[in-house]
Image (cartoon, rainbow, N blue to C red):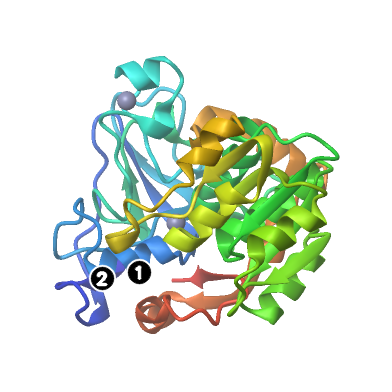
Amino acid sequence: MKAVIYESFQGPITLKNVSERTPKEYGVVISVKATGLCRSDWHGWMGHDQDIKLPHVPGHEFSGIVESVGKNVRNFRIGDRVTVPFVCGCGSCGQCLSGNHQVCDNQSQPGFTHWGSFAEYVAVDYADTNLVKLPEEISFKTAALLGCRFITSYRAIVAQGKVLGGEFVAIHGCGGVGLSAIMIAHALGAQVIAIDINDETLNLATKLGATATINAFNNPHIVEQVKSLTKGGAHVSVDALGSATTCFNSIANLRKRGRHIQVGLMTGDHCHAKVPMDKVLANELEIIGSHGMQAYKYPELLEMIKKGKLHPEKLIEKNISLEECTQALPNMNKFDHKGVWLVDSF
Ligand SMILES: [Zn+2]
Ligand SMILES: [Zn+2]
């Protein structure tokens, strides 16, 4: 099968013929029909992810058709149209048994713990736990956009943030995660403040439902501006970028009893960012993480898409081929993307 592969961190990325995947007893192999590029793939290539063993095939948000099935899979068969969340659960640890597969103790992540979806085929273990059947109305492209950024934002806004209509929501950083969060919070009836360093990105944020925008470039007054726009502070605030500055601002711009949701990955020097803990105490703030979403929670999200309340496909900036992926991946860290790049030809 064709696959995008690298043999050293920060080294060349090439399109090569590699051996076909075979399903495990409880797993399947999926023929990939669409797959998104994400900054986590870039972090992996940089060497920021301890799970990755070389040589490696990245790619973790995808959709496709079940190609082959392990002997113990009960609920899926060859030909099913499916997608998976980027965190796949084992189905049997304490976290999975409590319904929290997104923090499974034995989790696997295609494109990190094993070869991913920048290839013609990808293997997924524990298919009955992790596969999501796609309704006919949901295209492969739309489904591929959900697996990482969109479901994490959905869980952040709906399950973790418990955003209500009329509440003020601040979104710090308008990449794929931030734009998804804006669309979802807007669909729930929230008033969304979008914060980013790029005016074009902020224009897109407005089109997706932001009611106000703040350009953060060389701007030391973001917290005050959010507080003024929200008449005292946001009810819910999301660090959708993952940096010490956006994390701090997202907590500091909350009103009393506000909820901060950390969605952007904190890596390198940002791992242990400074927190305004005095405000957390005095104002009873909540600090919550969001890490993917369980496969069994997809139907409510797919229903909102079917009803036209959410339009993930609006996040697509560019469609590229698997071959072009080799050039696009090393450049993911340049902040010139105004949406998601999607591989749709293999
Ligand atoms: Zn991702
Ligand atoms: Zn588990």
Find ligand 2 in the image and state its quadrant: top left
Depth check: 29 or 58 in front? 58
Q: Quadrant of residue 125?
A: top left
Q: Residue at x 25, y 62 (%)?
A: 48
Left or right of 18? Residue 294 is: right
Left or right of 53? Residue 264 is: right
Left or right of 305? Residue 115 is: left
Depth check: 123 or 252 in front? 252
Label 1 SS: helix
Q: Residues within 10 Å of mark 2 (few under 14, many from 20)?
A: some
Q: CA distance from mark 1 to mark 2?
A: 6 Å
Label 2 SS: helix
In the rendered structure, find residue 42 and report the number of the disc placed on it.
1
Q: Residue at x 30, y 23 (%)?
A: 72
Above or below, 3 against 251 in this view is: below
Residue 325 image position (x, y, % from top left): 41, 77
Circle 2: residue type:
Met
